[in-house]
Image (cartoon, grey):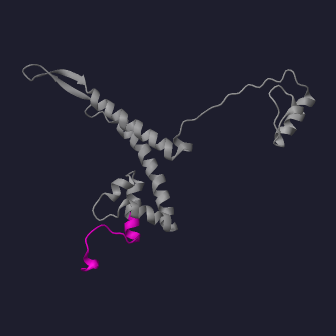
Amino acid sequence: MGDEANKPGRPSDYTEDIAESICLRLAEGESLRSVCSDDGMPCKQTVLRWISRRPEFRAQYVRAKEEGAEAIAEELFDIADDGTNDWMEKLDKEGECIGYQLNGEHVQRSKLRIDTRKWYLSKIMPKKYGDRIQHDQTITMADRTDDDIDKRIRELMNGQSATPEGDDQDSES
């Protein structure tokens, strides 16, 4: 068959050096897909197998992804603050600059880059970067006595329900 030891290709054996290299790049905000596409790196499926089979690598990977999320969040400011190419020279018929005009395509691309990163952060770290949802509720108890309210509280604490009209005798358990 040939010498398997000299077979070129992607590494599939776990080494601490490769694991550290992968995690350093992930911590900088690079995607696993991008890291694994480079020569000398294992394929994505191999890395995912390492994550499932090696607890020490799994913990290192999780930390790297959290740090990577922070790097992506910081990158949002860099994208927003970078005005390079937002304006283009406006030329007359002779090719002379007569002013500047907004480069709408570049501005929209920057907006898309920011929105995509914000969406991604909201999905991978929803508690930190997700939308906050506030629920407001008004409860009216004008037709109930204090005894009725106390009874209803006890029922709710015991996992019983009552009809909305307050007919607690006919409720299903």
Horizontal relation, residue 39 to residue 151: left or right: left
| Quadrant assignment, res 84 | top left
What segment is highlighted magenta in the picture? 1-20
Nearest the viewer among 6 and 39 is: 6
Q: Quadrant of the C terminus?
A: top right
Q: Main secondary structure of the magenta part?
A: loop
4 to 169, vertically: above or below: below
Q: Residue furthest right?
A: 147
Number of labels in the image equals 0
Residue displayed at 10% across by 22% down = 96
Q: Residue furthest left?
A: 94
| Quadrant assignment, res 128 | top right
106 to 93, vertically: above or below: below
Residue displayed at 8% across by 19% down = 93
111 to 18, vertically: above or below: above
Q: Quadrant of the N terminus?
A: bottom left
Nearest the viewer among 155 and 2 is: 2
Q: Please state the horizontal and vertical placement of residue 40, each as a whole percent of the image.
A: 29, 65
Nearest the viewer among 7 and 140 is: 7
Nearest the viewer among 168 and 121 is: 168
Q: Please state the horizontal and vertical placement of residue 133, each as a whole percent of the image.
A: 60, 33
Q: Please state the horizontal and vertical placement of residue 5, each as a whole percent of the image.
A: 28, 78
Residue 37 in magenta?
Answer: no
4 to 32, vertically: above or below: below
| Quadrant assignment, res 82 | top left
Horizontal relation, residue 135 to residue 49: left or right: right
Q: Please state the horizontal and vertical placement of residue 57, each as a whole percent of the image.
A: 47, 65
Residue displayed at 34% across by 57% down = 35
Horizontal relation, residue 122 to residue 84: left or right: right
Horizontal relation, residue 24 to residue 39: left or right: right
Residue 9 in magenta?
Answer: yes
